[in-house]
Image (cartoon, grey):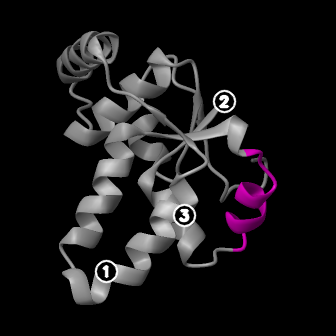
Amino acid sequence: MLLLDANTISYYFRGDPQVVPRLQALSPDDVGVPAVVAYELRYGLARLGPGQAGRRLQALETLLLPMWTAPFDGECARLAASLRAELESRGEVIGPHDILIAATALRHQAALVTRNVREFSRVAGLQVINWHTPDA
């Protein structure tokens, strides 16, 4: 199972030649989004206002509809708290949403597709895939 980070979905909508064919080649059964990512994307569009966000929101909903939304549940919360404490103790803090996304991917035993390798690679045990590298 692959979970998509918000930046991967943003690159898809921009027509990125590294992302579009890879995403289109996947079965909706093999790809999902963490609930936190769905929130981030919808919030970003909501900030644009109804006049500017209408078509974009419709396109996002169409993309997300067949995908699984990985829930942030109690086990994700436990993992996120542990991850955050561990990263803080090492002085390697990552963003608060990124902690929740990483915990969701770990909880659901999924690889995370993101271009934000710098932060997510700090999370032990998290499989990170960057479609913008030749070996992806």
Report helix, strand or loop for mark 3. Answer: helix
In contact (CB < 8 Å): disc 2 and disc 1: no
Q: Nearer the viewer, residue 91 or 74?
A: 74
| Amino acid type assigned to the residue bearing label 3 in the image | Thr
108 lies left or right of 21: left
In contact (CB < 8 Å): disc 1 and disc 3: no
Q: Answer whether residue 19 is magenta in the image.
A: yes
| Residue identifier under label 1 | 53
| Residue identifier under label 2 | 1
83 lies left or right of 115: left
Per the model, the C-alpha gap separating discs 2 and 1 is 30 Å
| Residue identifier under label 3 | 62
| Amino acid type assigned to the residue bearing label 2 in the image | Met
* Label 1: how many Cα within 10 Å (few below 14, some 14–19, many 20+): some
Task: List x then y, in percent, for residue 25.
Answer: 81, 54
Quarter of the image for residue 11 reads: bottom right
User: Which stretch is magenta?
Assistant: 17-27
The disc, 2 or 1, on the residue closer to the chain's N-terminal end is 2
The residue drawn where x is 47% and y is 48% is: 5
Task: List x then y, in percent, for residue 44.
Answer: 26, 67
| Amino acid type assigned to the residue bearing label 1 in the image | Ala
The residue drawn where x is 52% and y is 54% is: 64
The disc, 1 or 3, on the residue closer to the chain's N-terminal end is 1
The disc, 2 or 3, on the residue closer to the chain's N-terminal end is 2
